[in-house]
Amino acid sequence: MIIMTNFLEVIREIEKKWQKKWQEDNVFVGVIDKSKPKWFLTVSYPYATAPLHIGHSRTYGLGDIFARYKRQQGYNVLWPMGFHITGTPVLAVSWKIRNNDEDEWKKYREYISIYEKDTKRIEEVISSFTKPENVASYFAKKIIQDFLKMGYSLDTTRQFTTGDSEYNKFIEWQYIKLNNKNLITKGNHPILWCINDKNAVGEDDIQAGDEIKVEVTEFVGIKFILENNSFLVAATLRPETIFGATNVWIHPDGFYNEISIDDETWIISKEATMKLMEQDHKITIIRELKGEEILDKIVEVPITKSKIPVYPANFIDTDHATGIVYSVPGHAPYDYTALVDLQKDEKTIEKYALNSEKLKQINPISMIKVKDYGDFPAVELCQKLGVKSQEDTGKLEKATQTIYKDEYYSGIMKDNTGDFEGLKIEEAKDRIADVLFDINLAAPIYETSAKASCRCGGQIIVAIIQNQYFLNYGDAEWNKKAFEALNKMTIIPEKYRQSFENTFNWLDKRPCVRRRGLGTEFPLTKGEGWIIESLSDSVIYMAYYTIVKHIKKNNIKANQLKPMLFDYILLDEGDIKEVSKKTELSEHIIKQMKEEFEYWYPNDLRHTAIHHISNHLSFAIFHHVAIFPEKYWLPAFSLNDMVSRFGEAMSKSKGNVIPIALVPEKYSVDLTRLHLASVATPETVLEWKDTEVNYAKQRLRKFWEYALSVTDTTGKKNIAYSFPSKILHSSVKTNLKSALEAIEKFNARDYILDGFYANIRAIDEYYKIAEHLPKTEKKAVLRDIIEKIVIIMAPAIPHICEELNERMGYTDYVSLKLIPDIVITNEDLLYALQSKYMTDLMEDIEQIVKLVKTKPKKIHIYINAEWKNVLYELAKKIFEEEAVQIGKVMSASKDNNELSKYMKEIANEAKLMLKDPTIFRIKILSTKNQKNAIEGYTEFISDKYNKAKILIHMADEKEIYDPQKKAQKARPMKPALLLE
RNA sequence: GCGGGGAUUGCCGAGCGGUCAAAGGCGCUGGACUUAGGAUCCAGUCCUUAGUGGUUCGGGAGUUCGAAUCUCCCUCCCCGCACCA
């Protein structure tokens, strides 16, 4: 109990002690050493706007295990870290703090209180966030501290942020390269836009943007011909329904504009006019009008050429698309309901002097055949749901969605749809739109998927940005090269390769400049206020780590970092003399930078979270193949999923966050590292449960105690190991061997499960079986294996291992100790088999003891006759590659001298074999080795059953004690038992 | 919708053609230690049985000497979908 409370405290002190030493001795600083193979790891750098939590430490912790493992394998390892601060988030935080956003202040008070205890200081820090750069610099500083407190073996001398002016030069160079290779194109592009700020908006800028998902929707604006070159433009998502149009709806009280647009005359709502002005049109307003002005007018439907009237409807929203829709009562519940409402509504008919006769003649048109519906799905569904009027919006919404879905997936165009007859709706929809566009009787109208406001209060609409710059990921040659690179890469876990392939196939043009956020100015449009989108900051920056050290050390200025310098260092292009002259840098410094890059690159492994696959990881491959020669392409990615708690992803609003900064005091660093890396496979969401952490804690404590019990002794010294000790020794070896095989494939979980947990269990087991053995032997064997475990498990639990290494009398760092070769001998394999054999045997004994319910005085164990081993080995050979056929065993036995005399017994045995053919797959111990194993455990078994006598009988021997004829039942690996 | 992943014993979660009744954990049950224990340690935890038997791995069909693992169909669940890092 005392040990219990103290254990974590002891460990925590140890953790601090070693972190300090590592830092003081610069143990993890990457320095060129050409005598060693290099290994360059990167883990995606964090975004510096908030404290990191335990979910992040899953990713970084795995990275650290890999880095430490490689280091202990003799590689010269470089694992640097920087910070991402470009884009909008830093600005958004700063903006909210500046505008005294209460929630934001509250959130940041909590964040900062993780690091600062004094309330006044907390307020001070937050106040400083009114300057964006302070947000980034504060968190960058804190996060790196957190990382070091987690024991990560980082080279901290190569830190930078994506906001550094020197780094911006590197990004500028990247874009110059991409542009030179014609990978940047121009075009128009719809985006979400705030009419107030006159600027693009992202999720951060939209009120409740994290809850309402606002997207750009493309409507087809169909031009209903009013008169020559003058149109009523009705917007729809379902252009195929044009064949069912019976009339046009307009809001009688709504305000509309007659506009001149691209040499045509349109009537659309006032709001729509404003929106279209941002959508790449030439517009002048001719006049304003109210909806009622055009009621009862007749328009011509494109394609069908039928003439239909314009009627009033209150469900029309003038602030949605064009504020005009056409009516398809057969297939649209709103339209049907509005039509019925109007036909009954004498008052309205009179008010607008509508042609009542004509109105009442209007009937729904059926033009889509849908499974499980009659001719008029809208009518059917409205009746079924009991829709009363067009005010019944809840039910109408539901009906609309149901029909949309049903018709979309199972609808077929009917014979009144001309060329489109028989087409599935899925297909007809796009075809009809294309035809309409072709004959210039439709135009795309962009609208937001939901009404939304900017944080500034302005309405958000869709705007078309002209001459926008794009990265052309769809470029056939670029794409092909990226695939080529991907095909050569190692992806861990391999199953994510598919996701990359899908991403590559889906990637097309991607806008690469923004008007908002921090970042590098776009070099092609200097002075116009275009910023390079921030994902481009995280695709080839790994290369920058190799040279940033020299930039900082030599105090190189941004304006010295000319493209030709990067060309020379990173691409080996150009002439050093000229570069030196133009950049005013000494040749020596330039050479050093080049040497550093050429030594470390490529980035041997990049480890990140899974959700980066479809963006920055894919782009990283694209940008590498575009810019670098093949020898510098990325060789490998490894990935892990996130951490959840109480079933949900960690987020401030869910209140389930554990900040990394609190890990050392709340848990322990080694404990957390161990748990995070081993409790789940990397591709699954890891649910953090304190009860499970507790398990890891108990095991860690046990390991610590076992290890401490042998720090005062030395290894094996002329002590002959008895059977149980040999078993322990070789099973630990076997476990460590498979642990090393796992981590070699970057499988940290199996590495820990096999190398740590399985070994502790093996020791537990040993202590049970070895109670009767001399203390000196037990200590010797334990010391022997602890030494190995300490070295091999150091990558996972480095602090504890450093401490034990020291307490065992070593003066070097275990973090730098080479992992020994573990060689599994035939003897080890035999012990493993014997151990398994004994576990099974003891289980059998235990089962019988339980059934008999009396304590046995004697335990007779019968080992099978030798000929049975011969038989099984023979059968194994026969069935190695083919199906099991008993006849073959029988005939082969007949030809075998040793077996032919037992044919009767073999017939019985064969029946058993057929029942359980797996027996042919397992390894079998000789009768002698079965006996050896049992003898090695005799004392233990005897002690376990009140000193019962253990008697081993060989079925072959004559005159054995066998009152119940058990001996003949013994099979290889399955001795028979008799308890008395 | 498109694309991907998944469904395992009370729960979480490994396994992905053969010692698989299926790792490990949690929970539960019993015991030890204790004044006590929601601490820790040990044992047990599908059903049956002097053991080598039966029924299980979302549902259904198939391939195989042998399937949780392979194939096909069905049902349900999760994730990603571009100007957001």
Image: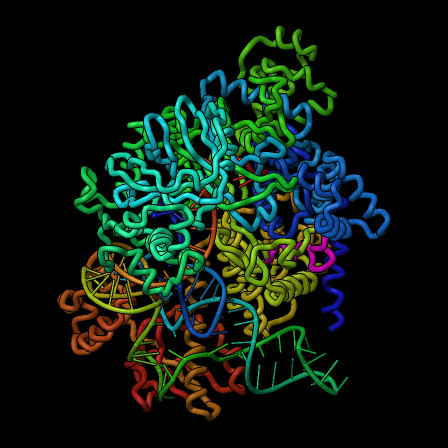
Residue at x 81%, y 48% (from the top left corner): A122
Give the answer, above or below, for where A614 lies relative to A532.
Answer: below
Whether residue A720 sits left or right of residue A828 in the image: it is: right
Residue sitting nearer the eye, A895 or A771: A771
Percent x, y of residue A19: 73, 46
Image location of residue A254, percent across then percent down:
49, 42
The answer to whether residue A18 shows anywhere in this view is no
Q: How is the image coloured?
A: rainbow
Membership of A320 in magenta stretch: no
Main structural element of the magenta stretch: helix, strand or loop? helix
Give the number of marks: 0
Asked whether A90 or A886 is in front, the reply is A90
Q: Residue at x 45, y 30 (%)?
A: A258
In this view, the residue in front, A278 or A20, is A278
Tell me the quadrant of the picture where the C terminus of chain A can be found: bottom left
- Relative to residue A230, is residue A18 depicted above or below? below
The x and y percentages for residue B43 are: 52, 79
Q: Classify A970 as above or below A813.
A: below
Out of A431 and A264, give the one closest to the viewer. A264
Q: Residue at x 32, y 32 (%)?
A: A225
| Image coordinates for residue A509, horizontal then vertical, percent | 44, 29
The N terminus of chain A sits in image quarter? bottom right
Residue A407 makes an appearance in the image: yes
Residue shown at the point (38%, 44%) measured from the top left: A249
- Residue A672 is inside the magenta segment: yes
Boundaries of the magenta span: A661-675
